[in-house]
Image (spheres, rainbow, N blue to C red):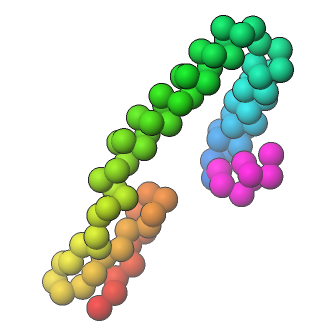
Amino acid sequence: MVSTLLWVRSLFGILVMPLIGLGVLLIAYRGSRWLKDFSIQFLGVQACISTFQQVGYLFTSPTRVYCKSICFCPIGCGVRQFRS
């Protein structure tokens, strides 16, 4: 719950993320062997796809416009910082 409050910004995320965490814990402790296997494979594939989609972002350099460097906010909030 503390992690959710630190990292999630929206009210929807603050409400939903703990529910997802509880669902994962419920599967871990009460789920059948098949459900546990399927769930861990599903989460692993989702993590790999997410990482693969963001590989280009990880290796981008700052953009230069009119001899100024633009550094975009790493969390995608759209804030731009101009540096000479």
Residue at 18% x, 87% y is 67
Q: Position of residue 54 (x, y in %)?
A: 37, 48
Residue in front for this viewpoint, 11 or 81: 81
Percent x, y of residue 32: 75, 8
**Residue 41 in view, yes or no:** yes
Residue extent of the magenta highlight: 1-8
Residue located 71% across and 57% down the image: 6
The quarter of the picture where the C terminus appears is bottom left
Magenta stretch mostly in which secondary structure? helix
In this rendered view, identify the residue nearer to me: 37 or 80.
Answer: 37
Report if residue 77 is visible in the image.
no
**Residue 3 covered by magenta stretch:** yes
- Counting from the top left corner in percent of width and height, residue 55 is at 34, 50
Q: Residue furthest bottom?
A: 84
Q: Residue at x 35, y 42 (%)?
A: 53
Side (left or right) of 41 relative to 55? right
Is 44 drawn above or below residue 38 in the view shown? below
Q: How many marks?
A: 0
- Is residue 79 shown above or below 3? below
Quarter of the view holding residue 82: bottom left
Q: Is residue 16 above or below residue 59?
A: above
Figure quadrant of residue 81: bottom left
Q: Is residue 43 magenta?
A: no
| Residue plotted at (48% across, 28% down) | 45
